[in-house]
Image (cartoon, rainbow, N blue to C red):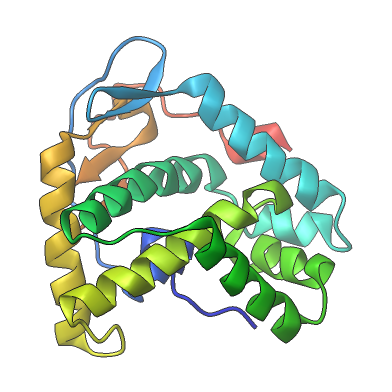
Amino acid sequence: MIRRRTALSVSAVALLSASPLLAACGSAPHPGSAAVVDGDRITVAQLQSQVEDVREAQRGSAQPAQLIRNSGQLTRATLGSMIFNRVLNRAAEDAGVTVSRGDVQKARTAMVKQAGSQDRLNAQWLQQYAIAPGQVDEAIGNQVAMDKLARALGADRNSPQGVQKLVTALSAASGELGVEVNPRFGAWNDKKVQLGEAKTPWLRAAPSEKSQT
């Protein structure tokens, strides 16, 4: 059974093993963007592509209805992970941490051995973190980066103090990147390093996940 957290999830929550409440912040990014991170656009099309990859994998699984039902906020969660991954990369860079292809291969080999097969590993990531098979290597790389960052910072991810040390580093990196989120998809909080719902009720929300299944 995969426990990262990273999976902060491989969501920021799983990677850090923490799920704090979010406060609303952020502004509307460039047209056609779901978010802008350090001037780099995450387009709505890119977001929808990742979401559809997950939905396609879920529909082809042994329990499609259950997996889809349990990931009703997939669009927001996916965007949150896409932003968080960029924040993690900056925090790792600031700490002098690098992740090689060999690091990812080594971690994947160990996980496949524990799971029993690559197919079983893919199924676990899909079930637990709503990550499609084609996204698994990136997710593993992020988990390796989080582990290395924790070691570089001397942070024990199993202790509140260690988690807070990680959050502090990630929050600083987030601030450096100047994250902007389209209010339709929520609001990014630098302090918590998470994406939450926007406090703008007059804006049309992102399409319901139920309508995409």
Q: Position of residue 187 (x, y in %)?
A: 26, 38
Q: Position of residue 80 (x, y in %)?
A: 39, 46
Question: Up-down: is 134 above or below 41?
Answer: below
Viewer-closest of 185 and 14? 14
Q: Residue at x 57, y 35 (%)?
A: 208
User: Image check: 19 left or right of 32?
Assistant: left
Question: Up-down: is 89 above or below 156?
Answer: above
Q: Is residue 194 visible?
A: yes
Question: Up-down: is 109 above or below 1?
Answer: above
User: Image check: 204 left or right of 26?
Assistant: right
Q: Residue at x 31, y 50 (%)?
A: 89
Q: Position of residue 173 (x, y in %)?
A: 16, 49
User: Image check: 127 left or right of 45?
Assistant: right
User: Image check: 165 left or right of 22?
Assistant: left
Q: Residue at x 74, y 38 (%)?
A: 213
Q: Residue at x 57, y 73 (%)?
A: 107
Viewer-closest of 54 and 38? 38
Question: Up-down: is 18 above or below 26?
Answer: below
Q: Position of residue 135 (x, y in %)?
A: 62, 49
Which quarter of the rendering shows the N terminus? Answer: bottom right
Question: Residue 53: which quarter of the image?
Answer: top right
